[in-house]
Amino acid sequence: MTSSRASGKTVSPTAASSLPDPLKPVPRDRYGFKKASHYVTVDQYDAWDIGYSEHISRRSKKWHALMRSYGLTTDPPFRFPPKSDKIKRYVRKGIPPEFRGAAWFWYAGGPSFLAREKGLYQNLIDKVNNGHLGDTDREHIERDLNRTFPDNIRFKPDPVASPQLDSPNSSSNVSTMDAEPETPIVQALRRVLQAFAVHNPSIGYCQSLNFIAGLLLLFLDADEEKAFVLLSIITSQHLPGTHGVALEGANVDIAVLMSCLKDSLPGVWTRLDDQGGSSNPAADLRLPTISLATTAWFMSLFVGTLPIEAVLRIWDCLFFEGSKTLFRVALAIFKTAEHAILGVSDPMEIFQLVQAVPRGLLDVNALLELCFRRRGGGFAGVSQGLIESRREERRKLVKEGARHAADGSSGNADDDCIEVEGRLRRFTRRVRSRTAK
């Protein structure tokens, strides 16, 4: 038996030889992410990817032909066909990886943002360098930088052996790795987050922005200014208030999601609704405990909730169609988990189920087909107009409840609403301050 000083445990030669080799290449996907996770094995990923790679190849050929038909360059692309039902169908079936970042920027309105705010990003970087970034935001950004996409090779490269240890004169037979310097994309991420925090003091830095900005940098060829622009568009247009210090937007959107869930999947809603008991109609927008899990879905735009290929396809639709995409995807996740949810009754089991199910959903085509299907249990009826009207209804309800509370005249339904809002606010504040896992 051989002894391990670091652990204080004994490790047999057989067991030691079965440990993973830190120098062996890690199986990675086309974007540099590790294929394996706690929910998906390499074999499962590879089996699914055989068909999906063919899907990407077909879509790439169709997109190249589409761009040529509009007389648009593809090397590199920077303009795209105007929005139409035809282009929407193309986007829903997936933007090819080589076009993705540029298409996001174009369809989100990035060029017009740059035209209005020429020189803004560099001015913000200058302000950061001149001490305008608060100590708290600076500290939180630094804390999360190296925790951003540790499974992506551009953020955390595979370790390399120290050359000295290969020498026959080395006195140690223990393999150690050279400390890797900070990668260029991590340095770019720091600058984008710092500039954003200075520009948006009502948000500053919120944990989850690092993953959103990091993914933007990956697909925008590390163009910091464009990543900053899209991060600004996401937080101001698609998820207004969601990442703010007061978190009003997050609470509003989760309430809207719960109301859509009640309408679309009443059986699932019955299992999730653990805040019942009030007969007041205002209680229809109360937030069940499951809201604590779904808050992270919206705050991170599903990064870390779904496999990366699904996240990318969702973002394709988000930048083209708007935030209704996020609500449809959330409902599709609940629909996918419907049978399992109806099979359990313990609230904690349901909570854990809702957290675990999406992480293994490799089949993004099936997930998105649910989002856009008009019949047979799909969610095409969840329109942007519906989302905006319910957002406004919720904001009015919250303001009314706050006014009644200030007057000391709140009724039972208002008390229910305020209590649940407070519970979600406390949770989402913990989300803001927790360390990334």
Image (cartoon, rainbow, N blue to C red):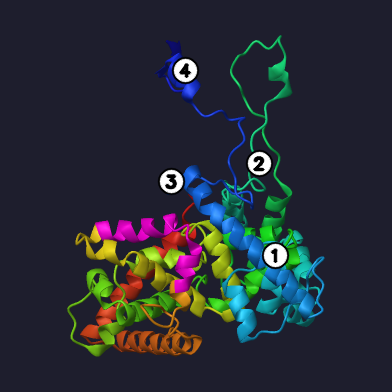
Q: Are marks 2 and 3 in contact (CB under 8 Å)?
A: no
Q: Is residue 337 above or below residue 387?
A: above
Residue 205 spot, x, y in % from top left: 58, 63
Q: Which residue is the site of mark 2?
A: 157
**Chain-order first, disc 2 or disc 3:** 3
Mark pair 2, 3: CA separation: 20 Å
Q: Secondary structure at mark 1?
A: loop
Range shown magenta: 349-369
Magenta stretch secondary structure, dominant: helix
**Chain-order first, disc 3 or disc 4:** 4
Q: Which residue is the site of mark 4?
A: 4
CA neighbours of label 4 inside 10 A, class few (<14), some (14 to 19), many (20+): few
Q: Which residue is the site of mark 3?
A: 38
Mark pair 1, 2: CA separation: 32 Å
Q: Which residue is the site of mark 1?
A: 132
Tell me the quarter of the picture where residue 74 sits: bottom right
Residue 119 within the segment the image draws in magenta? no
